[in-house]
Amino acid sequence: MRCFLSLIALAALIAFPGCKSAEEIAKEKAASDADLNLMAGTWTLAKFTKDPDQEDDGGAKPGEVTIKGDILERTGDWLPRQKITLYAVKEPKQIDLVAVKQDGTPEQRKYTVWVKGSKGKPGKSVERTGTYKQVGLYKVTADSLTICVSNDETRPTELSQGPGRQLFEYKRAGKGADGERKDDGEKKDAGKLKEPKEEKKEKKDKID
């Protein structure tokens, strides 16, 4: 009987090689949730690198984004809101961004996709209508967020600038180039200014 059950289990694995165990699914969800929590907050765009082969559309580039839950919001951009799906156990880590409405449901809209040229012909932008989805890669730490997305609906293979992809490098809002919070620096400076006064007070107390 045990041999029979083992054969059934083996057959199931062969027939459905992509099936994941409950433990694997839970592990993937935990990793993605942890990264999503790390992304929460406001981020300032430190550097944007466009696809060198793509024409500049002249549109506004997102200077700041805010992430709440699984929603990314931008100000001053044609793409104000996207829903985030992370695949944190992948190597490199993967991200999907889908344009959504205020209520979080997919938005049907016009958008352009960059189609690469072939046989020596230049690439071009093609207009489409439907659910706009960007696929890419990401890396997040406490103070930095890097997102690389494709322009031609194929996921990038590396988290870097180059043909067929755009690279967004963010810093946590309120952080300087050295990673130190601006208000932390102000507190340190304030502390330094107070030191002489405190020393004078101590000297006066000793004299008295």
Image (cartoon, helix red, strand yellow):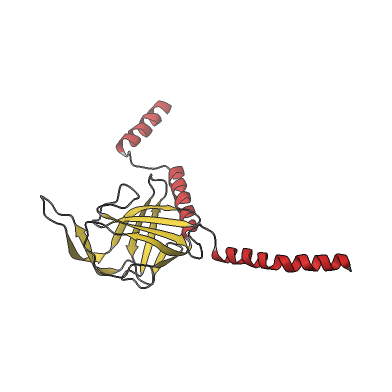
Q: Position of residue 116 (x, y in %)?
A: 18, 54
Residue for point 17% across, 63% down: 126
User: For the view shown, which residue lies furthest in the right direction?
Assistant: 208
Quadrant holding the C terminus? bottom right
Which image quarter: residue 200? bottom right
Residue for point 36% across, 42% down: 19
Q: Position of residue 129 (x, y in %)?
A: 21, 67
Taking depth in this image into account, of 124 and 203 the one nearest to the observer is 203
Q: Where is residue 18 in the image (x, y as percent from the top left)?
A: 33, 41
Quadrant holding the N terminus? top left
Image side of residue 146 versus residue 60, left or right: right
Asked whether residue 1 appears in the rendered view, the answer is no
Which image quarter: residue 145? bottom left
User: For the view shown, which residue lies furthest in the top direction?
Assistant: 3
Taking depth in this image into account, of 64 and 27 the one nearest to the observer is 64
Which image quarter: residue 198? bottom right
Identify whether 169 is placed above or below 193.
Answer: above
Identify whether 21 is placed above or below 183.
Answer: above
Instruction: Give the tally of numbered discs.
Output: 0
Residue for point 31% across, 34% down: 14
Identify whether 160 is placed above or below 43.
Answer: above
Image side of residue 157 versus residue 186, left or right: left
